[in-house]
Amino acid sequence: MESRSSERSGSSRYDIVIVGAGPVGLMLSTCLARWGYKIKHIDNRSEPTSTGRADGIQPRSLDLLRNMGLKSNIMAYKPARVFEVAFWDPPKTGKGIVRTGTWASCPGFIDARYPFTTLLHQGLIERVFISDLEKNGVHIQRPWTIKDFKSDNTVGSEYPVEVKLEHVDGTQRETVRAKYLFSGEGAKSFVRDQLGINITHKDPISHVWGVMDGVVKTDFPDIKMKCTIHSEHGSIMVIPREDNMVRLYIQIASSTDPDWNPRKTATEEEVQASAKRILHPYNIEWERVEWYSVYPIGQGIAAKYTLDHRVFLGGDACHTHSPKAGQGMNTAFLDALNLAWKIHAVEAGLADRALLTTYEDERKDVAETLLSFDNKYAKLFSQQPAAATEVQAASEQTTPQAEDNEFIKTFKESCEFTSGYGVAYKPNALNWSPAHPANSSLINPDGIRLRTGRLMINADVTRVVDANVVHLEQEVPLNGSFRIYVFAGRPSVTSRALEDFAFHLSNKKSFYSSYLRPDIESVSHHEKHNPHSLFFTICTVFAARRGRIEIVRDVPNLLARYRDHIYADDRLDRRVPDATAAAHAKMGLDQEKGGVVVVRPDGYIGIVTSLVEGSGTVDALNEYFGAFCTKKLGERRAQL
């Protein structure tokens, strides 16, 4: 019988096909759309998420959204903001529950701009990304699904991936070719299954959870805070939400139960009754239920994130875990960001294709760490606390012995990791280590506090051109460029070193001049970030008061072209109260002599070098970039 489906016509070649319009797919699509790539983006739902799903944006993710110019759009929805977590447990005597302590959501030992968790319905977050995509000419094709694909690097085609798509009702079909295919389909990924990639479950313990979003009437005093509640009747996690809503996570079943059934379910009314028992002696009633779901949770990770570096997986297609740590959407964002800038670096001609191998290496390692933390979180949440004093010690930090308590250590470690600031990428071509091909003695100077593979430390500085106090780490937007931070120390000490640095950057074989813009002669005078190269932005930071810096006098011409990125390190910082140049001091750089910090496009430290007279600093950076760039960098030396 003839099918009634029809083949869509139109352009059939794309840089990438993205399947799934959840957080990971939208972040990847948004980045690549902004950088000019042609995208086919499909989703099998007829509209964005309407209720439920992920809701927590951690501090590091909020930094990222600000760097993308999207934070204000998110905050316009007036999300809930969680600054503290409250712990409720059975009292030492009697029945019911009592508050046994609180702990900062993002404690003071973490140097965060936004020390809170932002809680907002995923659908509203999706809409912010979708609006940005539409401004850049990308529209999600709904409701469409992927039916088949084939990737063949041997055919020599610029578009080696063939993808067959279909409207969910079967009425239309489309076959396209692409350079890349990305699965952001979630845990039930068709692409992953077709590739034959297995999910390995990291922990034999699984749980069935009920999650309920709604508006409640209650006398429970901490309903506006994130809470973990243990009682003799079970456990609940409370998450405040926007528009007076609250989310409750309630464990329905565990594989440790005698009658364990992974398909066990419960009705809305049963879960509400359970919540009432757990919260006793407090009362709770539901004015309305926005969303309710029951689902099993297992900690799993994909064996591979790609087989050929043309077809990739990300987000829940790669890793599944409990919702308690609030990491699903945040990990998805960083999966997408990691892949996006690497695809850009390869396709735009900066980096060798081998750079794409670092996506799986870096992000799978983070997922492994996440699952380990999630396992600890699950055990902490599920166990009956033997003594309330443990939580009180975590809240109050009263004794040295308290620091050694396993509960407290685990909770603090979790805070750093779940905030996003604890993510650390291991050494590779991008993240310098002693094993890296770059082996100059100027690399990794003594006293440095920055760690390669970690985020750059936050710092306040004064922008010279307009006297605005700014956040240095936010000054270069997410634009696919490496950020070269020249901490220039005292001008009277480093003037020659700075001149030499600029001179050797101008060498046509330097990492910088090897990748100049083809349209450099016609670039607008007002271009702030990429006047010379689309791959590098240079920021110069002097250890001097703004009034003592004259750009014409103190800054070499090449660096002065980045006049909007010249700063005075003259702001006080409570973390280094005795420093005369706080940003230099926080980085661990000599406040007289400075140094150079290379930050990857995603905000992570690549390499740190001393700033010296002569060619040494640029030579060291040529060695670093030469490990993954497409061109031979630096002066050629005679071979004996």
Image: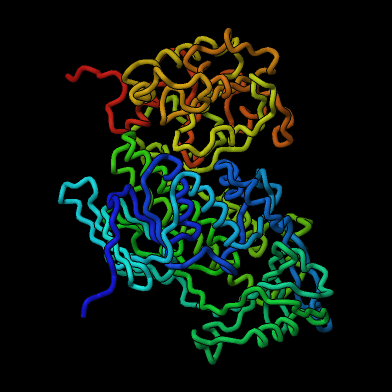
Residue at the bottom extreme of this rendering: 259
Left or right of 535? Residue 627 is left
User: Can you see residue 178?
Assistant: no
Q: x, y percentage for residue 103?
A: 73, 59
Quadrant of the rendered image containing residue 390 = bottom right
At a point 61% along the width and 15% down the height, the residue shown is 490
Vertical placement of residue 193 versus 464, above or below: below
Residue at the left extreme of this rendering: 155
Left or right of 106? Residue 185 is left
Q: x, y percentage for residue 610?
A: 49, 23
Vertical placement of residue 629 versus 329, above or below: above
Quadrant of the rendered image containing residue 438 = top left
Q: Nearer the viewer, residue 467 or 357?
A: 467
At a point 28% along the width and 49% down the height, the residue shown is 13
At a point 35% along the width and 16% down the height, the residue shown is 507
Q: How is the image coloured?
A: rainbow
Q: Nearer the viewer, residue 69 or 394?
A: 69
Q: Quadrant of the N terminus?
A: bottom left
Q: x, y percentage for residue 125?
A: 58, 56
Q: x, y percentage for residue 439?
A: 37, 29
Q: Quadrant of the C terminus?
A: top left
User: Can you see residue 456?
Assistant: yes
At a point 70% along the width and 33% down the height, the residue shown is 576
Vertical placement of residue 344 versus 272, above or below: above
Q: Nearer the viewer, residue 602 or 136?
A: 136
